[in-house]
Image: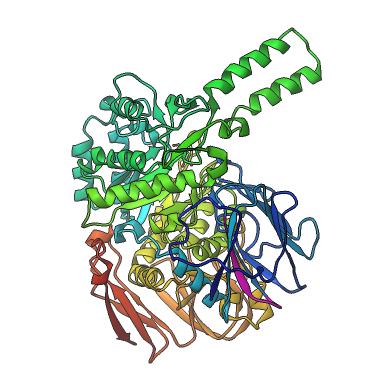
C-alpha cells in the first residue's frame, strides 16, 4: 500500500512512474514542520532498525549518524563522509512500526537518524516542495516490493557484463590492452571485459579516439571479441571547448549546454580543460548527446560507463577568476600562519563549489531552472538519456551501462558502481553494507571497484575482496593512476585468483537467474539477514553477512591476516567450501554461531536449508560457456526455478523458466 503526500509544488523527478493521487489527510508516522524549509520527524523505538539510503557510508542499520543526499564527487569514503555519488532517499523502518518512506526531492536533503537526538529520525530540506511516499506492508520484503513497483523495473545488463572485468586508469595504448588480455589468457583466468578509461580519447574529448594511442581501435575490438573480451569505454559529462570539435560546435549552436544567469554557456575546468555541460534536463539535448555514443557502437562497442556526472567540477571559469583576485590580495609576502590558512581555503574552495552549482541553469520545457535546485538529477538524466539513445542505436541487444552519479529512477536505465573507494579492508565491508540498500532503490546491477581504486592493494586484500566480488552482479577490478598494479596476474600464485574467479563463472547460471527474477519481480538480490528472519535478534543485528538470491548466504572475510571468521546461521545450512584445487566440499551446519576457518585461497558460502542451486562449467569468458550443461548442488529433493535466456536479447519476455530437480 503506497500513499503519496505532496507539499508545495515539487519538481517532477520521474523517479515514480505510477500515477498516484496525493492524499488530503495528514501524513502518518511523521510530525511535519514547515517553519524553515520542511522537516519530518519520527520517534524511533529502542529496537527499531532504519534501513536504506542506498549508496551511503556506515551500517546496514543507518541509526546513529546523519547523511546528506547530495551527489558528490568525493574520493575519500570515510565513516564520517555524509554524501557520496548517489542520492537514494528511501528509508525503511523496521520494529515497533514497520514502514517505508521515499522522499522525492531533487536536491540536498538531510537524514538525521538519531544523530542530534538518539531517538529521533528527522528528515529535512530547504524548500517545502516535496512528494513523500509512505509504503506499508506486512514485512520489509513486501514494503520494498511495493516501493519498487512504483519506481519501475530495474535495468538488466547483458549476461557477459556479469563476467569478470578488468579496469585501470589507464591502459594508455591498445598494446597495453592487448597485454592485459594476453596475461589473463596466459594464466587461464576468465575475463569478459577490459575498460578504457579517459586516456583512450583525444584530449579527453567525448566520442573521439586518440589516433596516436588507439589508432587501431576497430582491429583491437575485433581481436578482443575473438577472445571473448569486450572493451568498455568511459564517457565523461563535460564537453571540451574546442573549435572544430563537432560535439562542442553543435551543442553550442543548438543551445544544448547548461548556461549561467546571463544565458551564456557555463564553463568549468575538468579533465579536458574548459568544458560545457550538456543540459540533460532538456530532453532534446540529452537525446542529442546520447546519439553520439553511436560513434563508438559503430566500431563494435557494446558497453559504457558514465563518469563525472554529479557533475564534478575542478573549478569554474568564474571561480578561477575570483581565485586569482583573492590570491593577489594576499600574495604580499606575508609568512603568517593566518595567511597560509587563507591560501589553503581559497584553493580548496575551487572544487565542486556551491557557488558554482548555484550559478548553473538548465532549460526545462523553456523555463530556466537553477542547477542547485535539481542537483541530484544530473547524472540520473545523463544516464537515462544515454540508455534511451542506445535503445534506438542498438534496439535488439542490451547494452552494458553504468554510471557514477545517480538518483532513484536511474535504476531503470543502468547500474552503478560505487566510485572511488580505497584499497582498505574497511571498504570491503562498506560495499557489503551498501549492496542491500542499493537493491531497495532498484539498483540491481551494482558493485564496487574490487581491490580498491585509490591506494596500493595487497595480494590478500584483492583475494578477500574477490570473495565478496564473485557474488556482485558488477564484478570489476579497477585501480587509480599511480597505484600499484592489481590485475590478478600481478601477484604471486595467480592460480588462486583463477580458482576463485572460476567459481564466479560456475555460479553464473544461478546469479544470472536470480538477477532476472529480482528484476522481474521487484525483489532484492542482496538481503540483510533480518529481512528473512524478522524475529531473530541475532539476524536483525547482523551487519556482515547477506543473502544472495533466495538460496545462498555469504559471510566474506574482510580482516587482514584472519584465518576465518565468526558466522551466524539463522537456520540450518549447508556450507560449501571451494578448495584450492577447485573441488567443492559440503558440510551440514546447525543453526547458531560458528567459527569457520577460511584460508586465503578458499571461499566458503552457505546454501539455505532445503535449497539447491545450478552450477555450470567455467570457461575463459561467458561466450565460451555452456549454460545448458548444469549440475545441481545442495539439499537432496530440492527444486530450483531457473530463469534463462540468450543473455543479450532486449526482449525480456523471451526469458524461459524451468524447474530443476535435485
Ligand atoms: O577525476 O577517469 O570514479 O573510476 O578512473 C577522476 C578517471 C575521474 C573518476 C572515476 C574513476 C576513473 C577516473 N575518474
Q: Please, is residue 578 above or below residue 484 in the view?
A: below
Measured from the top left, where is residue 384 in percent x and y? Answer: 38, 50
Front-lying residue, 579 or 385: 385
Q: Which residues are magenta?
A: 95-104
Q: Residue furthest top?
A: 332
Write the residue at 39% across / 60% down: 501
Q: Is residue 232 left or right of residue 124?
A: left
From the viewer's side, name the closer residue of 13 and 557.
13
**What residue lies at 75% left-to-right and 69% top-to-bottom?**
44
Residue 656 falls left or right of residue 371: left
* Res 465 visible: yes
Q: Position of residue 49 (x, y in %)?
A: 68, 70
- 100 in the magenta segment: yes
Residue 351 sits in which quadrant?
top right
Count the labels in the image.
0
Query: Which residue in the rendered view is the most extreme toward the front?
Result: 24
Q: Is residue 234 above or below residue 157?
A: above
**Magenta: predominant secondary structure element?**
strand
Colour logic: rainbow
Amino acid at each position: 500500500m503506497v500513499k503519496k503526500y505532496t507539499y508545495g509544488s515539487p519538481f517532477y523527478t520521474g523517479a515514480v512512474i505510477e500515477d498516484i493521487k496525493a492524499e488530503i489527510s495528514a501524513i502518518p508516522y511523521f510530525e511535519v514542520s514547515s517553519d524553515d524549509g520542511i522537516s519530518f520527524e519520527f520517534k524511533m523505538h529502542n529496537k527499531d532498525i532504519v534501513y536504506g539510503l542506498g549508496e551511503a557510508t556506515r551500517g546496514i542499520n543507518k541509526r546513529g549518524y546523519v547523511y546528506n543526499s547530495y551527489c558528490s564527487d568525493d574520493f575519500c569514503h570515510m565513516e564520517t563522509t555524509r554524501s557520496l555519488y548517489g542520492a537514494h532517499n528511501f528509508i525503511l523502518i523496521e520494529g515497533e512500526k514497520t514502514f517505508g518512506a521515499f522522499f522525492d526531492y531533487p536536491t540536498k536533503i538531510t537524514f538525521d537518524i538519531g544523530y542530534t537526538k538518539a531517538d529521533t529520525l528527522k528528515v529535512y530540506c530547504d524548500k517545502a516542495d516535496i512528494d513523500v511516499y509512505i509504503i506499508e506492508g506486512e514485512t520489509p520484503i513486501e514494503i520494498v516490493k511495493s516501493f519498487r513497483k512504483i519506481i519501475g523495473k530495474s535495468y538488466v545488463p547483458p549476461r557477459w557484463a556479469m563476467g569478470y572485468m578488468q579496469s585501470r586508469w589507464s591502459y594508455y595504448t591498445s598494446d597495453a590492452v592487448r597485454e592485459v588480455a594476453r596475461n589473463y589468457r596466459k594464466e587461464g583466468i576468465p575475463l569478459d571485459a577490459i575498460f578504457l578509461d579517459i586516456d583512450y580519447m583525444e584530449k579527453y574529448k567525448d566520442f573521439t579516439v586518440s589516433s596516436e594511442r588507439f589508432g587501431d581501435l576497430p582491429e583491437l575490438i575485433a581481436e578482443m571479441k575473438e577472445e571473448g573480451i569486450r572493451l568498455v569505454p568511459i564517457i565523461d559529462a563535460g564537453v571540451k571547448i574546442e573549435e572544430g570539435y563537432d560535439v562542442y560546435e553543435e551543442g553550442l549552436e543548438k543551445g544544448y549546454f547548461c548556461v549561467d544567469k546571463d544565458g551564456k554557456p557555463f564553463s568549468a575546468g575538468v579533465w579536458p580543460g574548459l568544458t560545457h555541460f550538456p543540459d540533460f534536463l532538456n530532453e532534446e539535448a540529452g537525446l542529442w548527446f546520447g546519439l553520439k555514443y553511436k560513434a563508438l557502437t559503430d566500431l563494435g562497442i557494446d558497453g559504457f560507463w558514465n563518469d563525472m556526472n554529479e557533475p564534478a567540477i575542478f573549478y569554474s571559469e568564474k571561480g578561477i577568476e575570483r581565485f586569482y583576485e583573492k590570491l593577489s590580495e594576499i600574495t604580499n609576502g606575508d609568512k603568517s600562519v593566518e595567511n597560509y590558512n587563507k591560501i589553503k581555503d581559497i584553493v580548496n574552495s575551487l572544487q565542486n563549489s556551491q557557488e558554482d552549482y548555484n550559478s548553473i541553469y538548465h532549460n526545462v520545457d523553456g523555463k530556466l531552472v537553477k542547477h542547485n535546485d535539481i542537483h541530484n538529477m544530473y547524472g540520473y538524466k545523463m544516464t537515462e538519456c544515454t540508455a534511451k539513445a542506445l535503445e534506438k542505436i542498438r534496439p535488439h541487444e542490451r547494452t552494458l551501462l553504468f554510471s557514477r552519479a545517480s538518483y532513484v529512477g536511474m535504476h531503470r536505465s543502468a547500474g552503478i558502481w560505487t566510485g572511488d573507494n580505497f584499497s582498505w579492508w574497511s571498504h570491503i565491508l562498506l560495499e557489503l553494507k551498501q549492496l542491500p540498500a542499493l537493491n531497495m532503490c532498484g539498483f540491481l546491477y551494482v558493485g564496487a571497484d574490487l581491490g580498491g581504486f585509490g591506494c596500493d592493494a595487497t595480494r590478500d586484500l584483492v583475494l578477500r575482496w574477490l570473495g565478496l566480488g564473485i557474488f556482485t552482479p558488477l564484478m570489476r577490478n579497477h585501480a587509480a593512476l599511480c597505484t600499484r598494479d592489481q590485475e590478478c596476474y600481478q601477484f604471486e600464485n595467480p592460480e588462486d585468483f583463477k580458482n576463485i574467479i572460476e567459481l564466479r563463472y560456475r555460479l553464473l547460471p544461478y546469479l544470472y537467474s536470480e538477477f532476472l527474477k529480482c528484476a522481474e519481480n521487484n525483489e532484492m538480490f542482496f538481503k540483510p539477514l533480518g529481512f528473512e528472519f524478522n524475529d531473530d535478534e541475532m539476524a536483525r543485528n547482523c551487519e556482515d553477512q547477506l543473502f544472495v538470491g533466495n538460496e545462498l548466504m555469504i559471510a566474506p572475510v574482510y580482516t587482514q591476516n584472519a584465518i576465518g571468521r565468526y558466522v551466524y546461521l539463522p537456520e540450518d545450512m549447508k556450507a560449501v567450501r571451494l578448495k584450492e584445487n577447485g573441488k567443492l566440499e559440503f558440510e551440514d551446519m546447525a543453526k547458531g554461531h560458528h567459527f569457520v576457518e577460511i584460508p586465503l585461497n578458499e571461499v566458503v558460502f552457505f546454501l539455505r536449508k532445503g535449497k539447491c542451486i545450478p552450477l555450470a562449467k567455467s570457461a575463459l569468458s561467458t561466450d565460451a560457456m555452456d549454460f545448458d550443461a548444469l549440475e545441481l548442488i545442495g539439499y537432496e529433493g530440492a527444486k530450483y526455478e531457473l530463469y534463462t535466456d540468450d543473455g543479450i536479447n532486449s526482449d525480456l519476455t523471451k526469458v524461459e523458466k524451468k524447474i530443476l530437480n535435485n
